[in-house]
Image (cartoon, grey):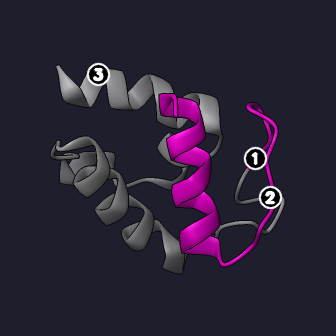
Amino acid sequence: MNKRDQIIEIIRQVSGKNLTPAPDESLFESGMLDSFALTDLVTELENKFNLKIPDSALNPRKFDTVELIEQNLEEWGS
C-alpha cells in the first residue's frame, strides 16, 4: 500500500466514512472531517508514519486535502 492509500485509509478510519476523497478534495468542506477529528487524524498519522507533527502545524488548512497531507508528511518526516 502506497503512502497516499495509507493516508486515505486513516481518513476513513477517523471519519467513520468509507469514502475515497479525490486527492485535491477539501476534507473539511466535504464534511469528511471536522475540527474534532483533526487531533485523531494527527495522532494516527504520527503513529502510522513514525513522526512527530509540530503543534504549530495543527491547523485544518494543513490537512485539508490528501495531497496537502502527503506533502506535509514529507516535510515533517525529514
Q: What residue type is labelled 2?
A: Glu
Q: Is residue 49 left or right of residue 60?
A: left
Residue at image point 40% right, 72% down? 40
Q: Is residue 57 left or right of residue 53?
A: right
- The relative height of residue 31 versus residue 67 in the rendered view (above or below) is below
Residue at image point 80% right, 41% down? 25
Q: What residue type is labelled 3?
A: Glu
Residue at image point 43% right, 53% down? 59
Could you say whether the residue bearing mark 2 is in a helix, strand or loop? loop
Taking depth in this image into account, of 6 and 73 the one nearest to the observer is 6
Q: How far apart are marks 1 and 3 (CA)?
A: 20 Å
Q: Distance between the residues labelled 2 and 1?
A: 5 Å
- Residue 68: % across, % down: 55, 31
Residue at image point 62% right, 38% down? 66
Taking depth in this image into account, of 20 and 62 the one nearest to the observer is 20
- Return the mark for residue 54: none
State which tag comes first along the sequence, 1 or 3.
Answer: 1
Q: In this view, does 70 lie to the left or right of 33?
A: left
Residue under numbered circle 3: 75
State which tag comes first along the sequence, 2 or 3.
Answer: 2
Residue 22 inside the magenta-drawn segment: yes
Label 1 near label 2: C-beta < 8 Å?
A: yes
Q: What residue type is labelled 1?
A: Ser
Q: In this view, does 13 lie to the left or right of 50?
A: right
Residue under numbered circle 2: 29
- Residue 22: % across, % down: 82, 37
Span shown in magenta = 1-26
Question: Which quadrant would the C terminus be assigned to in this image?
Answer: top left
